[in-house]
Image (cartoon, rainbow, N blue to C red):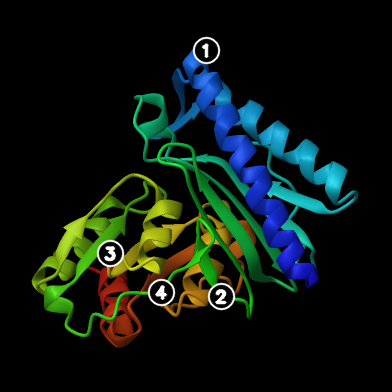
Amino acid sequence: MTDLARRRDSAAAIAVEAAALAAHLRAEGGGVASLKGAQDFVTEADGATERFIRDRLARDYPGEAVLGEEMGGAPDEAGPLWVLDPIDGTSNFARGGDRWCVSIGLVMDGRAVAGAIARHAPAEVFAAAEGQGATLNGAPIRAAPTTDIGRGIIEAGWSLRLPIARFHRLAQAITAAGAGLRSGGSGALGLADAAAGRIDAYLEAHINAWDAAAAVVIAREAGCWTNRFDSGDWLASGNPVGVGAPALGPALAALLEASAQPA
């Protein structure tokens, strides 16, 4: 087994345990949300789950850097750097929904190269390592074979880190192209669903590194078209993200570009 495969498997095992912990904490009352900012929710379980993941990574990979949503960290461009979101989809989590997950990605030389995403219910684990394919619960996954965007289903994420008009332009461009529009409240799961061919693409005008570090590897290894998300200052500042059916790549890039144009 290669080092990347070993790290992928470690990320998957830790993510499964962390998702179970988060679900337990919610059942015990740790899912009550407060606001870090407008529509930016956090629960007691977020912090406890991130501490658990950090402790496990420190045990298994002592001295390696970690960047997490709740506790931060200094981005290490050279790596190895673990980039994690203890609960992606916190607004769903806090309301008792099941569309949330734990995401753990690995970055080397500034590029996302391995990672895993775990849901608790339904029990699903997406995982990938560069050059070794992507899996869901151990079975290979591939991007959708869709060639006509007018027959596609596209999930669009939104963030108040940008003017809401950016999301409106993206949503309008998607529907004008004839595609169906979805928004499920978890960027990591939206990206993973595109990797598994459950939807035809996931687009968001801005997403943070911890939301997508694992998912972009999974999408690339599943054969998706992907934009250059893990480039530039992405670890500190995030980037636009787009993944989807490979035949739709030019059209998806154009949709992201359209959302960036002034009204």
What residue is shown with label 3? 199
Q: Please say if the residues under marks 4 and 3 sit with CB atoms less than 8 Å apart.
A: no
Q: Residues within 10 Å of mark 3 (few under 14, many from 20)?
A: many
Q: Residues within 10 Å of mark 2 (few under 14, many from 20)?
A: some
Of badges 2 and 1, nearer the viewer stands 2
- Quadrant hosting residue 81: bottom right
Residue 104 percent across, percent down from the top left? 62, 52
Q: What's the amino acid at mark 3?
A: Ile
Q: What's the amino acid at mark 4?
A: Arg
Q: Residues within 10 Å of mark 4 (few under 14, many from 20)?
A: many
- Ranked by sequence position, the earlier of labels 1 and 3 is 1
Of badges 2 and 3, nearer the viewer stands 2
- Ranked by sequence position, the earlier of labels 2 and 3 is 2
- Ranked by sequence position, the earlier of labels 2 and 4 is 2
- From the image, which quarter does the N terminus lie in? bottom right
* Numbered disc 2: secondary structure: loop
* Numbered disc 1: secondary structure: helix
Q: Residue at x 53, y 69 (%)?
A: 134
What residue is shown with label 4? 142
Q: Residue at x 84, y 43 (%)?
A: 58
Q: Is residue 140 visible?
A: yes
Q: Is residue 50 left or right of residue 80?
A: left
Q: Is residue 48 left or right of residue 181?
A: right
- Ranked by sequence position, the earlier of labels 4 and 1 is 1
* Numbered disc 3: secondary structure: loop
- Outermost top residue: 29
What residue is shown with label 2? 133
What residue is shown with label 1? 28
Q: Is residue 10 or residue 244 the one in the foreground?
A: 10
| CA separation in Å, label 2 and label 1 | 37 Å
